[in-house]
Amino acid sequence: MRQGLRRASIAALLMVACAGGEGSSSSERGAPRPSPLLAENGATVLSGRMEGVVVEAIQAKGYTYLLVDDGSLEQQWAAILGHGVEPGERVSVVRLALHEDFHSSSLDRDFDRLVMGILVSSSS
């Protein structure tokens, strides 16, 4: 079951990467928006995982923004597809891309650093 969910998450994220997503700077309505995962859109490609406890979770337009405390001095923000993660849960997120000075149009909020990733596990 988890393998199927993981594959579905990866497929959905790839569809967003190809079709465009949150955080674009396109001002024309209906114009295709560049994917937040593409280097041309200012992303730095990452690897590895982000693991820790969710301090804050904000849901917006199919994404969940997670403030993750990994035990270091600085907490990190990550954006994942889907909903259902709550504060207090321990998460593991595969890191795909990093955006610096990212603006979320749906939240009307700026993030100094935002990791785009795929949630691979969560537990309370």
Image: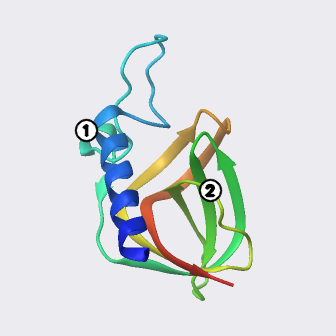
The type of residue carrying mark 1 is: Glu
Q: Nearer the viewer, residue 6 or 56?
A: 6
Q: Quadrant of the N terminus?
A: bottom left
Q: Disc 1 or disc 2, which is closer to the eye? A: 2
- Circle 1 Cα neighbour tier, 10 Å, few/some/many (<14 / 14–19 / ≥20): few
Q: Which residue type does callout 2 highlight?
A: His
Q: Position of residue 39 (x, y in %)?
A: 26, 45
Q: Is residue 57 left or right of residue 40?
A: right
Q: Which residue is mark 2?
A: 83
* Comes first in the chain, label 1 or label 2: 1
Image side of residue 30 versus residue 67, left or right: left
9 lies above or below 101: below
Name the residue: 67% across, 39% down: 107
Q: Nearer the viewer, residue 116 or 86?
A: 86
Question: Neighbour class for label 2 at 10 Å: few (<14), some, many (≥20)?
Answer: some
Secondary structure category for the residue under label 1: helix
Q: Quadrant of residue 95?
A: bottom left
